[in-house]
Image: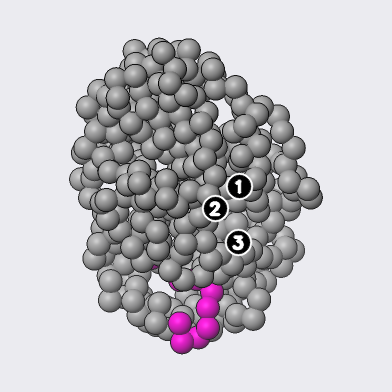
């Protein structure tokens, strides 16, 4: 197998409603879509969502990476199978480019590009051999002990910061939809978190697993005080309570707070994970495909967490299309030990669908296994090309 062509698209994906949390309010996504075609005609698709406040990437920095990169090594390599493709992608390096003015880049700078590229290539490779992408987990040395087949999985609900009436409505929807787990965004300006948790707990019931996400809203010296009035509502986890610059201080917070802490914005790369382990700053990792650099990177980070007795969830980026939702489904249905699962909000959140299949979770947050080749979905290429505002041929007709 060899890559015949590789094409990148910038697609503005509109959301059906704005999504607000303590760090940002989002109305649409500047989405990177990559199409990979092999010489045998197999076509794969990948997606990446740049986030300046997470990985330091904007859609403009993504395009600078794409135009500066030398993709010839990808075109020159032949793949005997999936692991050869993984090795080739591991060896591929994005060039050093500057981030946008005022943005400090970390090791994760470029991860959304890596994710979109990896998924596109692997989707094409697995389509070529007629197997689902999720089979890759047990093929990876890091994933062999974590591989476990699930026929279906259950996603969490999410309540974002909003006006009281919308909070009530969201919480009741979670109950009516029978979600077993619900995440509540806290720390937003103008929102009383204690009142929010009180109405949420009353609406969803005592049996629902509630966890909190502060999206970097607090300082280390105030986390314990901020959490005290919220403890009676039995939160099972607190996600990213402080900015990345203060994350080292969470080691002290963990000694004072009897609620597990999860890292998100501070957990975007293996280097982040190793620092978190060495500094004892968390109990769980939030793995997100685009944020962490792709499917393979997330398997490796989950394995690293397990080796160090830490938990992990599979999260998602706001406004993922069916491409990333399908990749997340493959991960969730083939990796054991996932503590929480987020994603597949497609029909509820994304206005511009790019796939024929509806990847939205069903009643109870349930999602079923995808057994088709590759990602197991059909991308509407005409829709992608019509919506694209920028297109770049990265590899053209390689022979």
Q: Secondary structure at mark 1?
A: helix
Residue at 62% from the left image edge and 73% from the top image edge = 188
Instruction: Point out the tag, 3 or 1, that comes first from the N-terminus.
Output: 1
Checking the image for residue 215, the label placed there is 3
Instruction: Point out the tag, 2 or 1, that comes first from the N-terminus.
Output: 2
Q: Nearer the viewer, residue 290 or 17?
A: 17
Look at the image and say whether residue 161 sits in the magenta stretch.
yes
Farthest right residue in view: 102
- As measured in the structure, the alpha-carbon distance from the residue carrying label 2 to the one carrying label 1 is 6 Å
Q: Residues within 10 Å of mark 1 (few under 14, many from 20)?
A: many
- As measured in the structure, the alpha-carbon distance from the residue carrying label 3 to the one carrying label 1 is 22 Å
In this orientation, does residue 135 appear?
no
Residue 63, how many percent across, how many down? 61, 39
The answer to whether the residues at label 2 and label 3 have Cβ atoms under 8 Å apart is no
Looking at the picture, does residue 62 appear above or below residue 263?
above
Instruction: Point out the tag, 2 or 3, that comes first from the N-terminus.
Output: 2
Q: Secondary structure at mark 2?
A: strand
Q: Nearer the viewer, mark 3 or mark 1?
A: 1
Residue at 71% from the left image edge and 67% from the top image edge = 222
Q: Nearer the viewer, residue 141 or 232?
A: 141
Which coloring applies here? one colour
Q: Nearer the viewer, residue 334 or 48?
A: 48
The residue pinned by badge 2 equals 30
Look at the image and say whether residue 365 sits in the magenta stretch.
no
The residue pinned by badge 1 equals 59
Q: Which residues are magenta?
A: 156-166
The answer to whether the residues at label 2 and label 1 have Cβ atoms under 8 Å apart is yes
Q: Residues within 10 Å of mark 2 (few under 14, many from 20)?
A: some
């Amino acid at each position: 197998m060899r890559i015949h062509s590789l094409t990148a698209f910038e697609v503005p994906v509109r959301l059906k409603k704005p999504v607000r949390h303590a760090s940002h309010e989002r109305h649409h996504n500047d989405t990177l879509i990559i199409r990979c075609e092999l010489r045998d005609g197999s076509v794969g698709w990948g997606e990446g969502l740049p986030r300046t406040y997470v990985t330091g990437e904007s859609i403009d920095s993504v395009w600078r990476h794409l135009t500066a990169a030398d993709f010839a090594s990808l075109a020159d390599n032949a793949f005997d199978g999936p692991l050869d493709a993984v090795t080739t992608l591991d060896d591929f390096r994005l060039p050093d480019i500057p981030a946008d003015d005022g943005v400090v880049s970390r090791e994760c700078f470029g991860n959304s590009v890596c994710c979109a590229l990896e998924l596109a290539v692997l989707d094409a490779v697995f389509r070529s051999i007629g197997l689902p992408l999720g089979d890759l987990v047990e093929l990876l040395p890091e994933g062999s002990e974590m591989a476990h087949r699930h026929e279906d999985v259950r996603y969490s609900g999410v309540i974002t910061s909003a006006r009281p009436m919308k909070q009530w409505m969201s919480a009741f929807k979670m109950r009516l939809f029978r979600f077993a787990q619900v995440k509540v965004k806290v720390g937003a300006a103008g929102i009383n978190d204690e009142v929010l948790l009180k109405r949420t707990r009353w609406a969803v019931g005592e049996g629902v697993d509630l966890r909190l996400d502060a999206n970097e809203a607090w300082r280390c010296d105030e986390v314990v005080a901020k959490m005290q009035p919220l403890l009676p509502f039995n939160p099972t986890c607190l996600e990213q309570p402080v900015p990345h610059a203060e994350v080292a201080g969470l080691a002290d917070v963990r000694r004072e707070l009897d609620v597990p802490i999860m890292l998100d914005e501070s957990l975007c790369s293996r280097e982040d994970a190793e620092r978190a382990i060495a500094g004892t700053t968390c109990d769980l990792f939030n793995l997100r495909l685009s944020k962490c650099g792709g499917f393979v990177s997330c398997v490796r980070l989950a394995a690293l967490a397990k080796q160090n007795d830490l938990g992990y969830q599979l999260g998602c980026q706001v406004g993922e299309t069916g491409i990333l939702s399908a990749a997340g489904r493959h991960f969730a249905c083939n990796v054991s030990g996932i503590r929480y699962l987020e994603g597949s909000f497609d029909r509820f959140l994304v206005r511009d669908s790019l796939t024929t299949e509806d990847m939205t979770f069903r009643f109870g947050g349930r999602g079923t296994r995808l057994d088709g080749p590759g990602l197991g979905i059909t991308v509407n290429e005409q829709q992608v090309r019509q919506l694209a505002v920028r297109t770049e041929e990265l590899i053209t007709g390689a022979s």
